Amino acid sequence: MSLTSTQIYYLRRWLQQQTNSLLIEEINLLITHDLLLLNRVKALPPAQQQQLATLVNIHQDLQKNRQAITSLQNLELQILALLQIEDHSPTQELIAAPADLQTWLETLNCTTQLAHHYLGQVIVRNYWRGTKPVSAWLMNFEVEEAGYITYKQNYSSTRNSSLHPEQETHLKQWLANFINQCQRVLPKFPQMLMDAMGTD
């Protein structure tokens, strides 16, 4: 098998940290007994086992650099996919695609408003700024001092226009990054957010 016992242990510890998120209940079975996780890994084709081992190594390196949060989130999605664990991201529940610019801004700022109650304006502002993916288009979005987000370019003429799929992907990633950052301090933040926005 491509993964060493140390990597399996690291993988199990990382999965254990995800139990407060909105992952499906299957993850609880995998972390209850090492044998179940080992069997899941052994069932993968050799190429995918090697890929998983590589991803775990990269994940360990990225954990040391918290500035690489976007890369880390993308990597974690790949690991979950290889383990056939579905990630029920709250971004999929909070906003339906496709959505216009106004809907996205309302969602982002509702998220800000909830986070204010628990984390304060300074932390919320820094979280939004620190989790924004690298994108020329996202440079049109400005995080104000209070943590609210505005769109700087021709908002009145584009507010009700549908976004390009790539633009929505960037916004989903930004929202997911922010939620995950908040979740490190408030484990129940994703569920609190969905409750606040009336999402089942």
Image (spheres, rainbow, N blue to C red):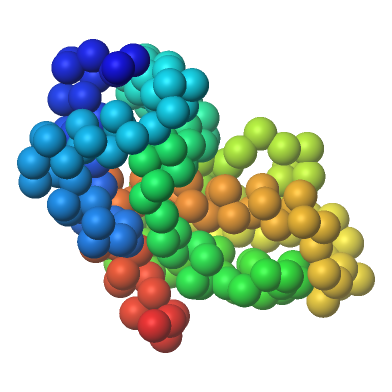
Left or right: where 192 falls relative to 179: left
Q: Residue at x 23, y 14 (%)?
A: 4
- Image quarter in which the C terminus is found: bottom left
Q: Residue at x 78, y 45 (%)?
A: 137
State whether residue 28 is above or below residue 16.
Answer: below
Q: Residue at x 17, y 41 (%)?
A: 36
Relative depth, front residue between 141 and 57: 57
Task: From the top left corner, tell me how far across and down residue 41 is, in percent.
Answer: 30, 32
Left or right: where 121 falls relative to 167: left
Task: From the top left corner, tell me how far across and down residue 141 is, in percent.
Answer: 70, 51
State whether residue 107 is above or below residue 70.
Answer: below
- Image quarter in which the N terminus is found: top left
Q: How many marks?
A: 0
Relative depth, front residue between 15 and 156: 15
In this rendering, does residue 194 appear at all?
Answer: yes
Q: Please tell me in which quadrant of the rendered image residue 114 appears.
A: bottom left
In this rendering, does residue 130 appear at all?
Answer: no
Q: Residue furthest left?
A: 33
Relative depth, front residue between 80 and 98: 80
Q: Residue at x 39, y 32 (%)?
A: 44
Q: Please tell me in which quadrant of the rendered image residue 138 appears.
A: top right
Task: From the top left corner, tell me how far across and down residue 139 is, in percent.
Answer: 73, 42
Task: From the top left corner, tell me how far across and down residue 185 is, in percent.
Answer: 24, 48
State whether residue 139 is above or below residue 64.
Answer: below
